[in-house]
Amino acid sequence: MENTMTLTLKVWRQNGPAETGRFETYEVNEISPDMSFLEMFDVLNENLINDGEEPVEIASDCREGICGSCSLFINGQAHGPDRLVTTCQLHMRKFKDGDTIYIEPFRAKAFPVIKDLVVDRSAFDRIQHAGGYISVNTSGNTQDANSIPINKDDADSAFDAATCIGCGACVATCKNSSAMLFVGAKVSQYSLLPQGKTEASRRVVNMVNQMDLEGFGNCSNTGACEVECPKGISLDNIARMNRELLKASVKK
Ligand code: SF4
Ligand code: FES
């Protein structure tokens, strides 16, 4: 077929968290440059099923860059070689005919492998549960959100922070497996808004404590997380989180 590619895939296979993993080699043919990376993966899995083999476990849901579940390490980069996109938004035109592509799960102690390329990222959920919310009485007396004036710069920065999709690329990319970009974004999206100020101290202390309990490493300012983040979350959010933490410790 014209303009299609034949690719060699080196795919990480691991039966479970306690098992030793290994790379398996597969070839896929007739891959269109217009396919997404996950569509290419669907071809691989259909081939495996047709051959009576077990398909490779991968996680995906929205396939439009929103849910953060399609987290793969592709040729040594979280979400692959493109910038500001998730794996589901990565197109095969970023590769060329005859390429060999290495595909691994996101690796971090706090993200144990469940199977093949699927990791357990529930540590992020527990960090969110520790404080990533505002307590609002929703019994019919809530004010319209627009009734509280908010300075445009703060609203924009809060919105930018809120675009974090919790994919974990920042952790997988960081040599220390630090989750500070994720937690910085989740703290910032509230700390910049009046609605988030009431619980600000408790929020940052509880979220950072939970982050440490989950076994994520410390930030050493390499900035790799910002480079690989599919949503362009800025390192400024880490600085803001550290300021919030300092404020909370002074208030004690
Ligand atoms: S900060 Fe970026 S890389 Fe980290 S979880 Fe959020 S969206 Fe993913
Ligand atoms: S499948 Fe939802 S972000 Fe990729």
Image (cartoon, rainbow, N blue to C red):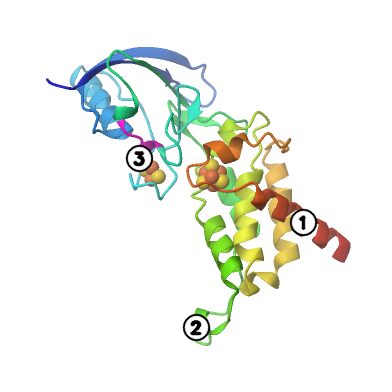
The label shown at residue 243 is: 1
Q: Are marks 3 and 1 in contact (CB under 8 Å)?
A: no
In-front residue for pair 14/8: 8
- Reading the chain from its start, which is encountered first: label 2 or label 3? 3
Residue 98 sits inside the magenta stretch: no
- Main SS, magenta residues: helix
Given contact means CB atoms under 8 Å apart, are the residues at marks 2 and 3 in contact? no
Residue at figure coordinates x 86%, y 66% from the top left = 251
Q: In whole angstroms, how far apart are the C-alphas of marks 2 and 3? A: 35 Å
Lateral position of residue 64 relative to residue 164, left or right:
left
Instruction: Give the amino acid type for the residue marked by disc 1 in the picture.
Output: Arg
Camera-side residue of 3 and 28: 3
Camera-near label (2 vs 3) is 3
Q: Earlier in the sequence, mark 2 or mark 1?
A: 2
Q: Is residue 88 above or below residue 52?
A: below
Q: Which numbered circle lies on residue 89?
A: 3
Image disc number at residue 144: 2
Instruction: Give the SS element for disc 3.
Output: helix
3D distance between C-alphas at marks 2 and 1: 30 Å
Residue 181 placement: quadrant: top right
Q: Is residue 81 visible?
A: yes
Judge depth for marks 2 and 1 and give the one in front. Answer: 1
Q: What residue range appears in magenta?
A: 87-91
Q: Quadrant of the N terminus?
A: top left
Give how far across and how far down residue 83 sits, in percent.
45, 37
- In the rendered structure, the answer to whether residue 212 lies left or right of residue 68 reads right
Q: Is residue 79 above or below residue 134?
A: above
